[in-house]
Amino acid sequence: MSNIKYIGVFGKRNTGKSSLINTVSGQDVAIVSQTPGTTTDPVKKRMEIFGIGPVVFVDTAGIDDHGELGMQRIGKTKEVISQIDIALLLFTNNEFGPYEIELVNRFEKARLPFIIIHNQSDIIAFDEGLALELGEKYKCDVVEFSCTLLDDKEQSIMVDTLVSLIVKNVSDPAFASKKLFDGLAGKGDVVVLVCPVDSETPEGRIILPQVNAIRDLLDKEACAVVVQPQNLETFLVSCKGSVKLVVTDSQVFDKVSKIVPQDIPLTGFSVLLARIKGSFANYLDGTPVIDRLEENDKVLILESCSHHTSCDDIGRVKIPALLSKRTGKKVQWDVIAGLDPLPQDMSQYKLVIQCGGCMITNRQLAARINHALELGIPVTNYGMALAWCMGIYERATEMFTTNKS
């Protein structure tokens, strides 16, 4: 799962957005120019911040751009809001006007934490009255900053202050990182991970949820046993009832469920992801809607990573085929890959099926799911949809619905 935090830097042209990124990172990672509009499409730059870990600064185009191309740049800037964990809003000359207010309104609507920064304070000092007013009005941190202080110590203090505020604001308990096996496995427990190798498996590697599962079990001092489906029965017989839990790739749910005895809990990697990421309760409510789909209803598939598709593709091939078989209806499908914008007319969809979301942050996933939920569109995810279509949904989710996890 992605533990990287995304930090969006917003403001009008020439407010020093790129310079701020360079100053905080201590290197020239963003292009700086006196020419307005130098930054066009959002530019992403990685670094490490102590107290957070890896972060990505997203340098956006000026919100006050103009012309046809400028409007496209502004559109790209606004799209970034749904993809980040915190926003830094820069302004200068004590001029906090309509452009800044519009951005703040968007941040608040997205429930996105933000910091207001008066930049270039070495040129024009930040008005203390305005600072107090903004802090009280928007209930956020407000700070002054400069990228060109001659006193290195003072510059360092200013950077440290801003970084500490970033750390504080991204530590949102609602989006805290949870682990796959919290409350499910502990020291000495044997957990079997069923990992088929097919054309969707990365060459020489296993997929990220499987990697994370192994690491979490090791951290908990549990025993992680990794097998392919064809070796599962042999292992279960040999271990003589010592298995605490079996977790399988959702695509072989039906095959694995016939092998695993009923007294051994069984679930899928994607179901585990749904439990700690996204909106599990809404997935539980939304999954049964599959059986209520009508002829020519539209379903939206959300892939959170971009990849080369194949005949084994779970989102574009397997789920549509199984859903059609389950419902006996001809259903229409749209697929959105990566973090591409959602369709403007979401009301056309009767169901949204989100992938596990292992490649995006909790907040990014929540932003996409919440947009559908706000419109009353049911949501589910890959693993839960597959389990439903294969007729083993109750078994795959039983341990979570019973224990209210």
Image (spheres, helix red, strand yellow):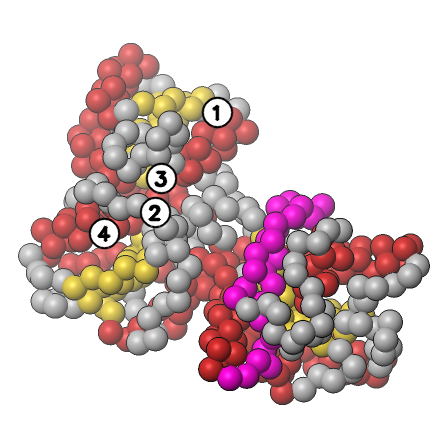
Crowd rating for badge 4 (residues with CA inside 10 Å; few <14, some 14–19, many 20+): some
Residue assigned mark 3: 269
Q: Is residue 46 magenta?
A: yes
What is the x, y in percent for residue 350? 23, 68
Q: CA distance from mark 4 to mark 1?
A: 35 Å
Contact check, label 4 and label 2, Cβ < 8 Å:
no
Amino acid marked by disc 4 = Arg
Residue assigned mark 2: 307
Q: Along the polypeptide, which appears first: circle 3 or circle 4?
A: 3
Q: CA distance from mark 3 to mark 4?
A: 19 Å
Q: Along the polypeptide, which appears first: circle 4 or circle 1?
A: 1
Q: Where does the magenta region start and end?
A: 41-67
What is the x, y in percent for residue 375? 34, 74
Residue assigned mark 1: 222
What residue is drawn where x is 80% and y is 55%?
A: 160
Q: CA distance from mark 2 to mark 3?
A: 19 Å
Q: Is residue 138 magenta?
A: no
What residue is drawn where x is 39% and y is 50%?
A: 305
Front in this rendered view, residue 199 or 324:
199
Contact check, label 2 and label 3, Cβ < 8 Å:
no
Crowd rating for badge 3 (residues with CA inside 10 Å; few <14, some 14–19, many 20+): many
Residue 224 figure quarter: top left
Contact check, label 4 and label 1, Cβ < 8 Å:
no
Q: CA distance from mark 1 to mark 3?
A: 17 Å
Amino acid marked by disc 2 = His
